[in-house]
Amino acid sequence: MQEQRISFIGKSPAVDYIRALIEKVKDLDAPVLIYGESGTGKELIARAIHETGARSGGQFVAVNCGAIPDSLLESELFGYARGAFTGALKDKTGLIEEADGGTFFLDEVGDLSLSLQAKLLRLLQEREIRRVGENRTRSVNVRFISATNKNLDKEIEKGSFREDLYYRLRIITIEIPPLRERKEDLLILLNYFAEKYSRDLKKERACFAPRTLDLLLNYSWPGNVRELQNEVQRCLILCGEDRFVGEEFLSPKINPRQEMSNSADYNFFGAKAEFVRRFLNQALQRSNFNKAKTAEEIGISRQGLFKLMKKHKIEESPKELGKGP
């Protein structure tokens, strides 16, 4: 599995569980339903299942059900025959057929109309499709993965989602917790994005000011990993050639008081040292001060951890660590 995919960067129990679940289901043909808020990485999980599984040699075709008008979605999914409607000048293969031998990903499946839900149910049962304007059926060999940010149980109660389709789609369920519930991954993700976008912008590795880091770590991230990714990219663009990201570069929603960095704080090495101290303190607290486990989680040797702790004057006792850097 490609560990560098954004949605899998982290060491939280939830991320580890999702990795293990993908490993179990990647070679199966059973449908998978992925739950998660917007920005949690539902499509990345679907791609990981496809790319590491038995169908990796086939196409991965994705469609967002909420992004295409219902009047066009049926012909996009199933294709159409020449003359089926005005403008249908030739036969067209649908997206589901294009995924034959591979994986078809239906994002925001909760937005499908009841009419299309009925057609999708038949497809899952019969493994056959019928293009718009055709009488013949065509067999397809496709694995279905769907995703939604809606509570489908409530949609069923409201009568807007078919219960029989729901049970067809959710043979295997993967739930992605929001970023606010796995804050132990925040520092790892921040570090990853800072390195990635510094490299993309062809600038030296940027470092977050201590106050900037505090604001980022205490924000609730309603847009999840996607919002975090966009925020880091924005900060690095706005700070220009500076290697030091002050809080004035943060979005107003993260820094509502529009706090400004003190010019005396603009020291790259001092800010970097402060970042390392905070990072190590949080990592040690997550592992209940188990040095071997901490070293393994952050990707360094145990001896390397002790050297960093000594360099940054981090005490070993839980009592001292609990006071923060």
Image: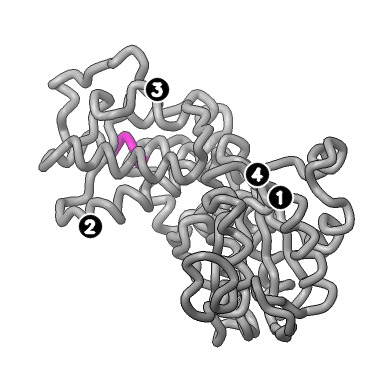
Number of the label disc, if any, that sits on residue 149: 4
Which of the two residues, 13 or 220, is positioned nearer the viewer here? 220
Q: CA distance from mark 1 to mark 2?
A: 44 Å
Of labels 4 and 3, the one closer to you? 4
Quarter residue 19 falls in? bottom right
**Dot 2 or dot 4, earlier in sequence:** 4
Report the amino acid beneath label 4. Asn
Left or right of residue 191: residue 262: left
Q: CA distance from mark 2 to mark 3?
A: 26 Å
Could you tell me which secondary element the residue under label 4 belongs to? loop
Residue bounds of the magenta highlight: 272-276
**Dot 1 or dot 2, earlier in sequence:** 1
- Toward the top, the furthest residue is 257
Could you tell me which secondary element the residue under label 3 belongs to? loop
Of labels 2 and 3, the one closer to you? 3
Left or right of residue 293: residue 243: left
- Toward the left, the furthest residue is 241
- Residue linked to disc 3: 253
Q: Residue at x 54, y 71 (%)?
A: 61
Quarter of the image with the C terminus in it: top left
Q: CA distance from mark 4 to mark 3?
A: 23 Å
Number of the label disc, if any, that sits on residue 113: 1
Which of the two residues, 27 or 82, is positioned nearer the viewer here? 82
> Horizontal and vertical percent for residue 228?
42, 41
Q: Is residue 176 above or below residue 44?
A: above
- Contact between marks 1 and 2 (CB within 8 A): the answer is no
